[in-house]
Image: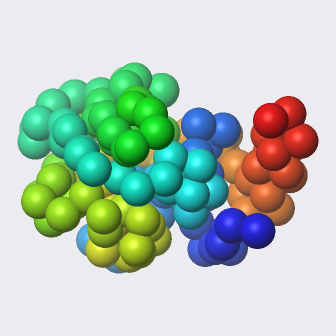
Amino acid sequence: MSEIRNNLRYTSTHEWIRVDEDGLVTVGISDFAQSALGDVVFVELPEIDGEVDAEQDVAVVESVKAASDIYAPVAGVIAEINESVAEDPSLLNADPYGEGWIFKLRVDSLESFDDLLGADEYQEHCQAEDQDH
């Protein structure tokens, strides 16, 4: 079973979200997602200072199996990007919840976080997806 961390929120499209102490929102792909993708070979990052809407595709992750869009979980402005994953895409596989983060958002409000999945809900979502495949 994939690792699902209790301190994060999740989307149905397998992004994880963490609110950092500096107020920025860090986004990456879940362990479930990186496992399903297989070896990640390329990451296309969003542009810094770009405004994004919730559920807008903002990045692309390519693996030996497939290409997958990465969506903004909430609306905001791209504050930082992780150049390390562009240089070494395997970080997404090796450390999806740490060094493998993809981008950080500056958000006006955390209200939309209520719409995101908690760890238990996300685990149920992953199990249902596993059964569908």
Q: Is residue 119 visible?
A: yes
Question: Dividing the image into 4 quarters, which one contains the N terminus?
Answer: bottom right
Q: Position of residue 27 (x, y in %)?
A: 39, 54
Name the residue at 50% across, 47% down. 37
Q: Would you identify the image quadrant in which residue 129 lies?
A: top right
Is 121 placed left or right of 4 in the picture? right
Q: How many marks on residues?
A: 0
Is 86 placed left or right of 37 in the picture? left
Q: Nearer the viewer, residue 91 or 5?
A: 91
Which residue is most to the front?
A: 64
Q: Position of residue 127 (x, y in %)?
A: 85, 51
Name the residue at 31% across, 35% down. 60
Is 58 placed left or right of 65 in the picture? left
Question: Dividing the image into 4 quarters, which one contains the C terminus?
Answer: top right
Q: How is the image coloured?
A: rainbow
Q: Nearer the viewer, residue 80 or 112?
A: 80
Q: Nearer the viewer, residue 54 or 83?
A: 83
Name the residue at 89% across, 41% down. 131
Q: Position of residue 117 (x, y in %)?
A: 70, 49
Q: Nearer the viewer, residue 8 or 100?
A: 100
Q: Position of residue 35 (x, y in %)?
A: 57, 57
Q: Is residue 113 visible?
A: no
